[in-house]
Image (spheres, helix red, strand yellow):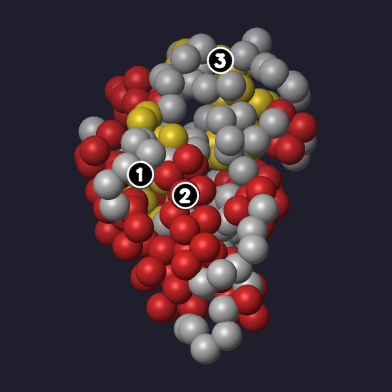
Amino acid sequence: MAVIGLGAAVFDLDGTLIHTEPRNRVMWSRLFDAHGVPWDDGLIASFAGRRGLEVLGDLAHLFPGRTVEELFEQAVSYESLPGMPAVAPVPGAVDLVRSLADAGVPLAVVTSGQRPYAERLLAELGVRDLLDLVVTGGDVVTGKPHPEGYLAAARDLDVPPAEAVGFEDAPAGVAAVKSAGMTCVGVSTTQPVGALAGADHVVADFKRVEVVPGPALRVPGLGHN
């Protein structure tokens, strides 16, 4: 167990607070299939933790004659199709956010998703009203792994980055948190522990992460301490 002091807690959304990766995988794979683009696990993994528009920009050569915006809208349209994988909270996530709010810890979410999507998921989780701030992919010039979103959260929360803890499930997000100068807790919901090697601590989920007086976090370790 490690005890981490914190002046603020900043969470990623997809894969960190809520399990959406199975649905996202189907969404992106359907887009590739619709355009006859061969794909593999590595190509799908390139979306993890990053803004979809930026990844599609990197892959634009695979979709001649199509704009990035068109492709993104098409992919998002698959979310509402019947048979898409369900989403569910990461175990312990909602209880942890509530405990942090009760302790008076400033709270934010920094997500690569767009605002309507993020606001809807956070409302479904029942935690939106507990958050002081939500920074979305549309609020920054450069997405993860760039630290812009996390630095914006620290600035708007009026907390020095060195006193904040960021929670992330993907390597791009871990890199963003660390580049911002925050302590990083990796959550191995979508990646093996080794893929989160840049994190200061790694947990399987939030079931055993506790808020203790300080306020501080007591964190069980999987791979780093």
Could you tell whether 118 is left or right of 20 in the image? left
Task: Determine which residue is flagged by label 2.
Answer: 26
Q: Nearer the viewer, mark 2 or mark 3?
A: 2
Q: Secondary structure at mark 2?
A: helix
Residue 130 can be seen in this image? no
Could you tell whether 98 is left or right of 111 in the image? left
Q: Verify CB contact (< 8 Å) between mark 2 and mark 3.
A: no
The amino acid type found where label 1 is placed reads: Met
Q: Earlier in the sequence, mark 2 or mark 1?
A: 2
Q: Is residue 68 above or below residue 176?
A: below
The amino acid type found where label 2 is placed reads: Val
User: Residue 78: image x %, image y %?
Assistant: 35, 58
Numbered badge on residue 84: 1
User: Residue 180: image x %, image y %?
Assistant: 63, 52
Q: Earlier in the sequence, mark 3 or mark 1?
A: 1
User: Residue 211: image x %, image y %?
Assistant: 45, 17
Query: Can you say which quadrant of the picture contains the C terminus?
Result: top right
Residue under the point 73% across and 38% down = 195
Numbered badge on residue 197: none
Residue under the point 67% across and 17% down = 221
Residue under the point 48% across and 83% down = 67
Q: Earlier in the sequence, mark 2 or mark 3?
A: 2
Task: Determine which residue is flagged by label 3.
Answer: 218
Q: Secondary structure at mark 3?
A: strand
